[in-house]
Amino acid sequence: MKNILVIGANSAIAKATARHYAEQKDSLYLLARDPEQLAVQKDDLMVRGATSVECAAFDATDFTSHGPLIAQALETLGHFDIVLIAHGSLPDQALCESDFNVALEAFNVNALSVISLLNYVIKPMQTRRDGCIAVVTSVAGDRGRQSNFIYGAAKAMVSTYLQGLRGRLFPDNVAVVDIKPGFVDTPMTAHLPKGALWAQPEQIAQRIVKGVEKRSSTVYAPGFWRLIMFVVCSVPEVIFKRLKL
Amino acid sequence: MKMHSWGRYPVSDTVLEAPRSRESFARHLTALRDSDDRQIIARGMGRSYGDSALSHTVLATKSIDNFIDFDEDSGLLRCAAGLTLDAILQVFMPRGWFLAVVPGTRYVSVGGAIASDVHGKNHHVDGTFCEHVTELTLLLASGDILKCSRAENAPLFHATCAGMGLTGIVLEATLRLRRIHSSAIEQRTIRTNSLEEAFEKFEQNLDCTYSVAWLDCLATGQNTGRSLLFLGEHASDERFVTPRKRSLSVPFSSPSFLLNRYSMGLFNNVYFHKPIRAGQLQRIEAFQYFFPLDSIQHWNRLYGRRGFLQYQCVIPDEGALEGMRKILNMVSAAGKGSFLSVLKKFGPANQNLLSFPMRGYTLAMDFKFEQGVLPLLDDLDRVVADHGGRLYLAKDARMSAEFFQSSYPHWEQMRELRREFFADSLFHSLQSQRLGL
């Protein structure tokens, strides 16, 4: 039985992952923005077999609240075996370019809040010398594309941060897993047309569970994105800048 | 966007909306009520075959897929309507619980199973899916949310069960699960060489919990109606095997000419002659017994781009043998039949206004969409009508309003009730419009 903290628990990917852990009879602590949705999810996870589920409402951009919230979660669970960070937003690129405040908000939600939260999570895990931190970033962070580079830059910031953190926590036996999903059919992307590359949140959840179990460094989800991103990153910039991607 | 259901026919131009939570359904509904578009239908997994989950605007229930409560003592499970039967079985089978009634696929939503009042291989013993639904929560056209059961708002309950989504949107339901003592089924297979023999065997085995026959609808002459009858009971060995995830998939529409009377005739022939040990008990996993086709994802793509029609009729006991024989002769004469068809004995009908099953025999066949199929099905309709039968709405994409209205005796009551709750101002599917509901 594991103790698991899920941040951004109402996201489709986090939800699917939490369900898996609930069916393994684990104990969960959920943080997310909408308390009504959290209550619904709590009941769901309990029926699925979770040993216990507690939750609290949280606002990713209210940085001062992060410390007390994580402390409360730690007190409830006792310790963290797994911390999954999955909150995020998909900002409108054109709007980000015309209004810096929108871009700033996107960075706050997708990047800075993650770094702030991790600050509080790391210490107890270091002290215990065990556990796994999994953060959902995106393949969009692997290379900047003109259609989506604010979101991409924010995710890239987190990925780079996680690379460094992985090394820092290695001696303390704490694993850091960077989850990079491709296109996922979730409410965040409900307005986009779907093609063959799109995956369901359950598929991503399976990759997360496996990645955490194996303490992998970077997990592309589904796995074929590793190949796609290898190709995308191999295109010389001279050509890439001319592509309307 | 272009949308179709499991039969891939017809294809409609549809606006898809996906409310994220129970609360947002009411908000979406209010917004739609104030717009020009007043033709809305709820859609779960899109596993009905024809046009019953197609409309101008479709509200997907997929995102309300949470469990709410389970009582170990009574076996009562409360859950949101978008949850699939698969999700329920994955969680509850290892704990010794099974759904009281399951259709031929577990990839349907609870809401869809209620709307179609689906039946299973135990209909002659346990009735339909809705007979094990104790309560449901319905979002009405007015935006009000109402609890319905046999005791509370009973008329609305019996109209919503089997109501094809035409009374409102089912948000939650309470189901009674069945205790099981194994994840396996003990199966007995009986080979029968004619339709008479198949009927006889059904009648002899009425006390058997599960029974279904796979029938070779392309066989002619002496072989007409030859079939394999599968009888099943839950095993009791207290062994629970975790169901395997499906693996095979049909990645794209295959050229439909691959399925022709010769290839399908060959398949049916091989299947019919597959080695069985007559009368012996065989232990197979429940998923394999109940959902053989679920192991191949997207099997509907085998019928090609133009899709297929499924024809499922029921004929009351008195004329069943004669009617079925006529139907099989017409189908094999036209050379239009398909993979193995399914024959099943039904128990009595229930009180739900548009429920399909009635005491008699039901036959389900697939037809590739091609020249000549629609006229053939119209001919079959006449045979079914002559023998007092009717067609299953969840599979229908083409029956006439006239045939529907003459074969569903409570359809006018349904229309009245829709008027009473203003459902007719908002909830329409392409099917309900075709049938004059």
Image (spheres, rainbow, N blue to C red):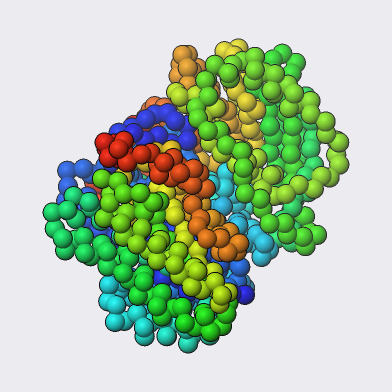
Where residue A9 appears, x then y in whole percent?
41, 68
Instruction: List x then y, in percent, for residue B295.
Output: 62, 41
Quadrant location of the N terminus of chain B in the rendered image: top left
Lateral position of residue A65 relative to residue B376, left or right = left
Residue A119 versus residue B81: which sits nearer the camera? A119
x and y percent of residue B304 in the render? 50, 24
Query: A149 and B71: which one is in front?
Result: A149
**Front-most of residues A12 and B192:** A12
Please tell me which residue is depicted at 39% across the width and 55% down the height of the picture.
A138
Q: Is residue A211 above or below residue B106?
A: below
x, y (%) of residue B398? 41, 27
Question: B249 or B92: nearer the eye?
Answer: B249
Residue B199 seen in this snapshot: yes
A6 to A67, vertically: above or below = above
- Name the residue rendered at 39%, 51% in the picture: A142
Q: If the image is split into quadrants, where does the C terminus of chain B sit? A: top left
Residue farthest bottom in this picture:
A75
Residue B433, visible in the rendered structure: no
